[in-house]
Amino acid sequence: MPRNHTHSALTLRVKASGESNREAWFLTEEAGLLRATVFGGAKSRLRSHVAPFHEGSLVIYHDPVKDSRKVCDFDVQIWRPGLRELWERAASAGALAETILSSQGGGGNWPEALKLASSVLDILNTAPVGACSRITTYFLWQWSQILGVKPDLCYCSVCSSEFKPEEFLWYSGRKESVFCERCASNPETLLRVGSGCRLWLTEIESLPPFAIANDIIQADAQSQEQAKTLAQAVLSGVLGKKLTTWEGI
């Protein structure tokens, strides 16, 4: 059985391991999340190539006895240096990476997961400061679709009535459901979602990330904040916690 495997991979995280080595986490199209050791000192070409948000063709050696992996080669095809130029871009990219890692790479839908992450990072790489927050919200909302937990914002979960355009709804993280005002019990414990937020989230579902960066579908500040809060609440339910990297985004 071959021990060298080639993957289409996105580097999500890199951290020191010992005096000169590093541990790296990748999202791959073929095998989902992979963790592998990068050997070599500070001047190693391989070490410089395996850096957060670099993307390309990854060759990994897998030792089935020890169940350990090491990076043999990484042909970087996308570098994304712009993510390090602005704090807002770096913070949004970090939130994206931590979300992917915390949700096991999107379950088994790895090709779609990699496609979404790659396209959003491409846009973040050159995004203006003011667009980073809504691009992150876009990613979180689309990621909830990949995980299969995105709520239907068109119909009440109890009575199945369709929400009117101007109607607001209530979201329950515990039940992972949305309710109309008639069916919402103890609304003070639920998240209120206004019509502007609901309209924006519904419309962006079919849009590419560059449309979000260019603010093609606009929403007022309150609706944007509600959309961010709702997207985080939906993912918090499946992850069991709210990620610290979401704070301040």
Image (spheres, rainbow, N blue to C red):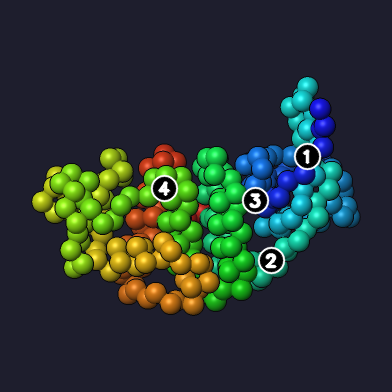
Q: Position of residue 39 (x, y in %)?
A: 84, 43
Disc 3 is placed on an element classified as: strand
Q: Is residue 245 visible?
A: yes
Whole-angstrom CA distance, mark 1 to mark 4, is: 32 Å
Whole-angstrom CA distance, mark 2 to mark 4, is: 26 Å
Task: Check disc 4 and report the residue beneath it.
Answer: 235
Rendered residue at 67%/52% (across/down)? 10
Whole-angstrom CA distance, mark 3 to mark 4, is: 19 Å
Q: Is residue 145 left or right of residue 173?
A: right
**Label 2 crowd (10 A; few <14 / some 14-19 / many >=20):** some
Label annotation for residue 5: 1
Label annotation for residue 80: 2
Q: Is residue 119 left or right of residue 71?
A: left
Q: Mark 3 near mark 1, Cβ–Cβ under 8 Å? A: no
Task: Check disc 3 and report the residue beneath it.
Answer: 12
Question: Up-down: is 54 above or below 16?
Answer: below
Disc 4 is placed on an element classified as: helix
> Is 179 in front, or is 115?
115
Could you tell which of marks 3 and 4 lies nearer the N-terminus?
Answer: 3
Q: Amino acid at mark 4?
A: Leu
Rendered residue at 18%/44% (across/down)? 158
Q: Please tell me how many numbered marks the rendered image carries.
A: 4
Rendered residue at 32%/75% (across/down)? 220
Label annotation for residue 242: none
> Is 246 in front, or is 169?
169
**Label 3 crowd (10 A; few <14 / some 14-19 / many >=20):** many
Could you tell which of marks 3 and 1 lies nearer the N-terminus?
Answer: 1
